[in-house]
Image (cartoon, rainbow, N blue to C red):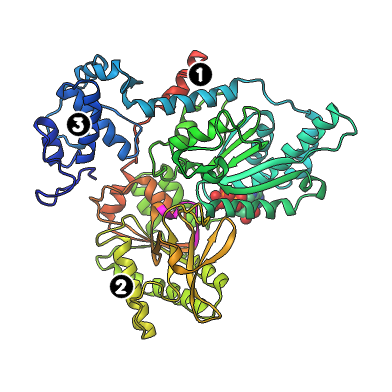
Amino acid sequence: MTELFEPVGDHDHRLALSATGTLADLNRAGLLEAGDLHVADRVADLAGGADDEVLLALALAVRAVRHGSVAVDLATVPDVAPELTWPDPVTWLAAVEGSRLVELGALRVEHGLVYLDRYARLEQQVCADLVARTRQEPPPVDEAALTAALARVGGRLNDQQREAAERSARQWTTVLTGGPGTGKTTTVARILAVLADQAAVLAAQAAPGAAGRRLSVALSAPTGKAAARLQEAVDAELAGLPEEDRDRLSVESMTLHRLLGWRADNATRFRHDRTNRLTHDVVVVDESSMVELTLMARLLEAVRPQARLLLVGDPRQLTSVGAGAVLSDLVAGHEGDPASPVVSLTENYRSRADIKTLAEALRTGTADEVLAALRAPSSQVEYVETDDPAAVLHDDTLASALAVRRAAEQGDPVGAVRALDEHRLLCAHREGPYGVRLWNRHVEQWLGEELGVDLRQEWYVGRPLLVTTNDHALEVYNGETGAVVLGADGRARAWIAGSRGLQDFAPGRLDAVETMHAMTIHKSQGSQARRVTVLLPEEGSRLLSRELFYTAVTRAQDHVRVVGSEAAVRAAVETRAQRATGLRQRLLAARGAGSAT
Ligand SMILES: Nc1ncnc2c1ncn2[C@@H]1O[C@H](COP(=O)(O)OP(=O)(O)OP(=O)(O)O)[C@@H](O)[C@H]1O
C-alpha cells in the first residue's frame, strides 16, 4: 500500500514549483501536495517564518487532515516513505514544541501528536463535552417503572439489547455499537419507549394530574437515506408496542445537518450551538461512524446537557470521509471503564451464516482465516480469482440494470428503486481499471447492446442515480439513490429516495448526481443490497484496508461475491486504515486525571 502520489510530468498541479529543499523533495516524492506547502507557507509567514523542520511538520499536519487524520505523528511519518531522509523524531518533535508556531498557537503538540490548532481545539471540546455529560448527576430513574417497562417493551430483546435499554435510562449518553443486523434499530425503538415511560412516570410524580408531555425525539444520521431508514425501522418497531407506549413519543427524522440547522452563509457553523441548544429530549444519531470530528463537535455543543444522546454505529466500518475516527476512538477510549457509555451488540440476526463468518474473520481474523471463509463451499459467499472481471460481472450487473430499466419504462419509481437494492457492484476506487467510472461505462454499454438502444444521453430512462453532495434547498442529500423514470407525459423524471420518501425532480435541477451501476465502497456505507459483488483492486492500491473490505462485505444480505487476487485479499486484511487522532488518549487521560484534557 502507498499513500504517495506519482507526479504526472512537471506540470502536475500537485507539484509546488516554488518549493525548495526538503519540502521540494517530499513534494516530488509524492508525499506532500502543492496545497499542503502553500497552506504551511502562509501559516509560517504569519509567525514570521519557521525552520525547515518545523515547516515540514506544519506541512505534514496539513497533509494529515487531507488524509483523514486530525494530527500527525512524527514518529511514524517516515514509514510512509522510508527511502527518504527524515529528521530524528525526538529532536524533531522537540524543535516543533519549542517553535514560534507553537508559541503563537498555530501548531500544538499534544499527546505526542502535532496538531493544527483548530483540530486540537475540536478534539479537546469533543472530549470535554463527552466527559461533562458523563460526570453530571445521572438522570433520575423510577426503578419500579423501569423494571415494568423493560418487561413490557423488552419482549424478545437479547441480554445485550436489554442492557442497552436499561443503561440508556440510567445515563445521559449511550454509544450503541454493532455490525449490520445486530438489532441496533430494534433496540433504539425499545430504548425510546423505555425513556418515554420514565419521562411520563416522573412527570406524573412531579405534577400529579397534569397532562403528560410527549417525549420529543430527533432521529438523525449523516445521510438522508440513513435517517429515513432509521425512521422507517423505528416506526415499524413502535407499531408492535402497546398504544400507550407509542402515544408518549413524538418522533421526527432528518439529516444531522438539518437537525443542527445548516446555514447558507457558513459551512461549518449551524443555527443550533451552545447558545441555542436543540430542544429535543432525545437525540439519536445512526451511522455515527460516518460523523467526522468537526460535525461531532457541533453536535455535542448543540445537545442540551440534560437531553439523552444515543450514538449508534459500527466502529469497524470505514471512518468518516472528513478527518477523525470519533466512534472508534470513543469505544477504545472507554475500554475497561466501569462507567463506559458503550454497549456492544454482537448477535447478527440478518445476514446469512457464511456472510457472518466472513465478516467475523474480517473483524478479527488473519488473512488465512479470511481466505478460508472465502473459499469454503457456500451458496452465500463466492470468491472469484480472475484477471478478467468483466466476464464475472457481466450477468449480474446487466440483470440489475435491466430490472431498473423495465420498471423505469413502466413509470414505476418504487419498482425501479427497489430493483436497485437487488444487486450492487462495489469498487474501492473511482478511477482506473477497478474504478466505478469504468464499470459504469461497461454496464451502460452492455445494457445498450442488450436493448439495442443508444444510452449516451445523460438522462436515459433507467439510469440509476447516486446523489453526491447535500442540496439543502431541494432536500436531497449525499448518498441518496434513485433512478430516471419515464413520466406519464413521456418525459423523464429523476426520482430520489431520500429522507422524505420518494421525490421526483426535473432532471436538470439535480446537478450533483452520478450514474450508479457501480458504487464506491465509501459511498455504500449505511446501505445494504440483497446481493453484492465486491471488486477488489490490485494489491498495491492505497485504499485497500481491512475496514474497506469489511464495509463492502457487510453490505450484503443474502449473497456476496468477492472478485480479486489472493494478494489483494491479503493486502486488505493486513492493512488497518489507521488515522492519527488523539481522542482515545484524551478520554483515557480524562478518566485517569478526573478531568477533561
Ligand atoms: N433479539 C432479537 N431476536 C430476534 N430477532 C431480532 C432481535 N433483534 C433484532 N432482530 C431482528 O434482526 C433484524 C435486524 O435488526 P435491526 O434492523 O434492528 O439491526 P441493525 O443493527 O439496526 O441493522 P443495520 O445496521 O443493518 O440497520 C431485524 O429483522 C430485527 O427484527
Give the residue at mark 2: 391
Any part of residue 381 in sight: no
Any part of residue 50 in sight: yes
Which SS class for mark 1?
helix
Q: Which mark is residue 85?
A: none
Res. 511 image quadrant: bottom left
Image quadrant holding the N terminus, namely top left
Q: Residue at x 59, y 60 (%)?
A: 501
Q: Tell me if residue 389 comes above or below residue 267 in the rendering.
A: below
Task: Tell me whether circle 2 and circle 3 mark residues in contact (CB < 8 Å).
Answer: no
Give the alpha-carbon distance from disc 2 to disc 3, as whole Å.
41 Å
Give how far across and how far down residue 436 sits, in percent: 33, 61
Give how far across and how far down residue 218 sits, in percent: 63, 43
Looking at the rendered structure, the kind of residue marked 2 is Ala
Q: Tell me if residue 521 comes above or below residue 245 in the rendering.
A: below
Which SS class for mark 3?
helix
Give how far across and how far down residue 295 sits, in percent: 47, 38
First reached walking from the N terminus: tag 1 or tag 2: 2
Looking at the rendered structure, the kind of residue marked 3 is Pro
First reached walking from the N terminus: tag 2 or tag 3: 3
Name the side, left or right, on which 386 lies relative to 235: left
Magenta stretch: give its range: 523-529
Q: Tell me if residue 488 comes above or below residue 366 in the rendering.
A: below
Q: Does the magenta-highlighted stretch encompass residue 525? A: yes
Name the side, left or right, on which 189 lies relative to 104: right
Res. 426 image quadrant: bottom left
Give the alpha-carbon distance from disc 1 to disc 2, as whole Å.
55 Å
Q: Quick one: label 1, few (<14), some, or many (20+) residues within 10 Å?
A: some
Image quadrant holding the C terminus, namely top left
Q: Does the magenta-highlighted stretch encompass residue 597? A: no
Give the residue at mark 3: 78
Q: Which mark is residue 591?
A: 1
